[in-house]
Image (tube, rainbow, N blue to C red):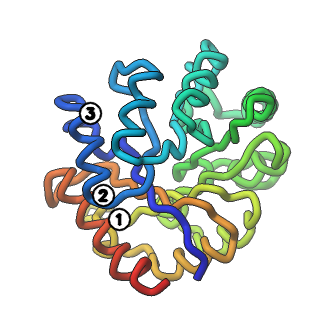
Amino acid sequence: MRRMGIALQLYTLREPLAEDFKGTVRRVAEIGYEGVEFAGYGGLSAEEMKRLLEETGLRAVGSHVSLKALRDNLQGEIAYAKTIGAGTIACPWLPVEQYQTEEAWTSLFKELESIGAECRKHGIVFCYHNHAFEFEQRVGGQFVFDALYGSTSPDSVQVEMDVCWVHRAGQDPLAYIARYAGRLPLVHFKDYAPTEDGTFYTKELGRGIVPLADVLKASSDAGAEWLVVEQDNCRDNPPIVSVANSFNWLREHYLAKL
């Protein structure tokens, strides 16, 4: 299996980060993660963040940036990403209530193409990160997920696939990974378990129902560059313990087998 980098989406640690941003990032490096994907910068300037990354040896894999911020301050977001050496900017979420018609989705696809083209001019890869709702609505007879990538160019919009949400939407993450091979630099590597009331919650790696071993192979075959560990909510253990446990799962089931 081809070697992919292992990063952490820092949204997982939003609570300890709010208390001690720099100390928490240092702990991520001590656990063994090679990179981080940001979901906010804790009030640090780009130069301060660059120094923290240099100190810890962590790579800035990318940043989740809201659609509002992309609209209001795209150049500022690009400049920050370039300063810290982040390779990607990803749109992580949409105000779904604004996208209930095919016309609204079509307009958004054009906007994402434009944002991605501007990022590309500055050497930044622009991605879209999915949830489940992209498989609950259709545009032109296709799931929104597929319509989005069919309406945008790979040069401008790449795939950051969250395999947990694909699975939760009732789709096969292995088939979707293969479908977007070559356009999939980042895979959100995440597990979950259903609950008795029909809801679900994310789990530490290996403690849910996502076929993670198969996802590893499929991601490698598809050319993914980074596995980005994420746990939306850590119910079983404190967040820092959960991300350590997930890294240990990857050490045993991935790194030890390379």
Where residue 244 appears, as percent x and y from the top left, is 24, 61
Task: Please determine whether, in this image, residue 257 is positioned above or below residue 129.
Answer: below
- Dot 3 lies on which element? helix
In three-dimensional space, the C-alpha distance between marks 3 and 2, rounded to whole angstroms, equals: 28 Å
* Residue 192: assigned label: 1
Looking at the rendered structure, the kind of residue marked 2 is Tyr
Mark count:
3
Q: Say whether disc 1 or disc 2 marks the residue closer to the N-terminus.
A: 1
Give residue 246's position: percent from left, percent from top: 30, 66
Whether 238 is drawn above or below 208: the answer is: above
Q: Which disc, if any, is residue 201?
A: 2
Q: Quadrant of the N terminus?
A: bottom right
Q: Badge 2, how many Cα within 10 Å: few under 14, some, many 20+?
A: some
Q: Residues within 10 Å of mark 3 (few under 14, many from 20)?
A: some
SS at mark 1 in the image? strand
Q: Nearer the viewer, mark 3 or mark 2?
A: 3
23 vs 202, left or right, is left
| Residue 91, x across and y down, in percent | 59, 36
First reached walking from the N terminus: tag 3 or tag 2:
3
